[in-house]
Amino acid sequence: MSFPTESQSGISGQRLRVLMVGNDSAETERMAAVLKRTGYALSFDTADQLEAFRERLLHCEYDVVICDHAFGASTALEALEVLRETQKDVPFIVVTTVLGDEAAVDYIKAGAADYVLKHRIERMPVAVGQALRERATRDEVARLRGVIAAGKREWERTFDSVPDPVLLLDHEGRVRRANRAAIETLQKTFAQVIGRPCHEVLHGQDHPCAGCPHAEALECGQLRRGDILNARADKIFDAACTPLRDSSGQLSGFVVVLRDVTERRRAEEALRNSEAQYRLLFEDNPQPMWVFDRVSLAFLAVNDAAVAHYGYSREEFLQMNLKDIRPPQDARPLLDHLAESRSGIQMAGEWRHRRKDGSILDVIITQHPITFAGKSAMLGLAADITDRKILEQQLLQGQKMEGIGRLAAGIAHDFNNLLTVISGRCALLCDKLEPGGRMRNSVEEIMKAADRAAALTRQLLAFSRQQILQPQILDLNVIVAGMGKLLRRLLREDIELVTICGNELGRIKTDPSQIEQVIMNLAVNARDAMPQGGKLTLETSNVNLDPAYAETRYHVSSGPYILLAVSDTGIGMDEATKPHIFEPFFTTKERGKGTGLGLATVYGIVKQSGGYIWVYSEPGHGATFKIYFPRADDPAVVIADSARQHHIFSRGKETVLVVEDEPSLRSIVVEILQSSGYHVLEASNGADALDVASKEGHAIHLLMTDIVMPGIGGRELAERLSVLYPKMKILFTSGYTDDVVIRHAMLGAGAVFLQKPFSPETVSRKVREVLDAG
């Protein structure tokens, strides 16, 4: 029998990591040689005992396990049981000298992918290739099942969230599914609806009825719409019935969308039957209403609400037609739309209308064919949804900013680890170089660049609202007044600074350093927007956002707030610029004149502090940034002097256990602490740390551990080691931000935390502070 060559197998260069289990090293080398000849880029580990096999599986990832039928005191069946316990999907191939049919069946039942006889070891590449393909197939099937399940769940959530009642019927008209809105509207239970015929559920009748949209759609195979009277529920529904077809084009069912129009239909009946009711429902209706000729589209009547809302007088309206209130650029085929109507059918849709002053409205128009003064006409009702459209735009903008924020936070975390290593190595290298030398100057320049990069990551974390804050109850007037000197030095002489502090101003809860950063960034932005000079105004006041105002803003809660308004008389912004100003790296300045992170940082700080920020600006009329902070009722704290001195001890002789899964970062922390005189133990993960600690003969004075690690996390490790060393101090570190820490419940109250990136001086100082703390 022949076996595939390298050219036949199509696997040349394919990486393959194998765990070889057995006692015969010569046999192992022989199998490795066979696989390499076939074209695999092979790397392999070996295990000659069952426990060694278990350890390999727990700590390494393999593409294939090749196991001798008997090794040490164990068998391949026992190894298969260990593999199952790890729950890893790794193909398992048995190698044996002789294997009977019964033993072969036992192995396959136990989960082995294949078996190879030693005197036919050249078959090994074929067995390996087949096992890998089978695993790839299993992975793909699992992925596709997950996609299908997720799609089904998403469809079910969407179906149930539709606000209008929706029913799915089979081809015989029986209800297959109903959303929650349908159940609530029909005032039935799911058991009373599912499986019941359409005439019973919708019409409240015991027998089929002709003329309903479902019957018409069944007859013609197209969408049909009409009113349905449900006598039992005493309701009238506007029903749109759409046929559903399978992949072969055969009718498979219907989707019925209902709208309860009971009150509207009764009002329309009253309008037709009584002039008094007509006046009540038409002239006094708070929504704009009109009647227009279906042929010429000329207005025949308008109510007072239409006159007030659109700005035209009644006489002007009656000299116009429906096309006159549409924007010229809106080319939607109005006549075609109207031609789709038929007697007795309600029509509804979204349109754009123009007021007399030229402003544009977004409206939902509901229309119904009527006879008016002997003419074929349409009765229309307009609902202004302009504010809703604005909210939708704000929602989309908010979602975009959230997505950018998550990206920024991820980038910042990765950079934190890298910058810690770069800065630390440079600092250690500087200590070994002569001051003033060329090499030391170069290293110092690298350190400066790393510091600038660290500042960049802090700005990204501020934007993404994932920085560590220390909020306090503050008087905003004190902050604004205290920054007067700094701002005057920051601004040019041709810019006038004006501060207007509100009387009896309420308190806010935020990080004082962060609010100072907000004011400074806005001041710099205003300065750059006034190249010819101007006036910068900082104003504070108490405001109350009522529910009506909150409804016009995305995700805003009503209640008391403290307003900080920063206004300038600069060049202003156009409508195309304003939606992007808070995005990281967006700038309108010349290349090299700005990073595009100033306003992004402001946005992040304000949002993380629970506030809101909006900008008002027009070209040539300056800009005003309004920030609303939630009002806090507690008394303000006195802000301590940031320049107070700390008594720092940077050296010691205690024993410190450093746990960090990033090797380069762990190496530099160990070197920093050793150079400061400490006895340092190190571990790459939680399990390793427990092993090191159990073997240490002396006390461990401090545990310095990363919070987020695979397997045993920092918090769990600290709890377990504290049992062995009750007096041990703990210092947590992380490149992740507070959102991640809180989400994983890693830190408790009072825990000591060191944020990456950090310098050697910071590490040494913080370790000393924790060891010396009571």
Image (cartoon, rainbow, N blue to C red):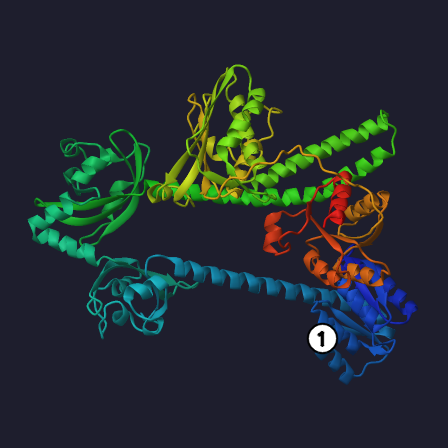
Q: Residue 444 location, x and y as percent?
A: 79, 30
- Give the quarter of the image for residue 289: top left
Q: Residue 124 location, x and y as percent?
A: 81, 68
Q: Give the side of residue 393 with respect to residue 40, left or right.
A: left
Which corner quadrant holds the N terminus? bottom right
Q: Say what secondary structure mark 1 lies in.
A: loop
Residue, far right: 26
Q: Residue 245 location, x and y as percent?
A: 39, 63
Q: Nearer the viewer, residue 76 or 755?
A: 755
Question: In the rendered image of this protein, does residue 144 appear above or below residue 67?
Answer: above
What amino acid does circle 1 point to? Gly
Residue at the image point whose x is 20% and y is 66% from the top: 234
Q: Nearer the viewer, residue 526 or 335?
A: 526
Question: In the rendered image of this protein, does residue 487 appear above or below residue 236?
Answer: above
Q: Is residue 28 at all visible to an observer of this figure?
A: yes
Q: Give the side of residue 507 with respect to residue 44, left or right.
A: left
- Give the quarter of the image for residue 182: bottom left
Residue at the image point whose x is 67% and y is 34% from the top: 644
Q: Give the side of residue 350 with respect to residue 621, left or right.
A: left
Q: Nearer the viewer, residue 505 or 170?
A: 505
Q: Nearer the viewer, residue 538 or 409?
A: 538
Q: Which residue is mark 1?
A: 111
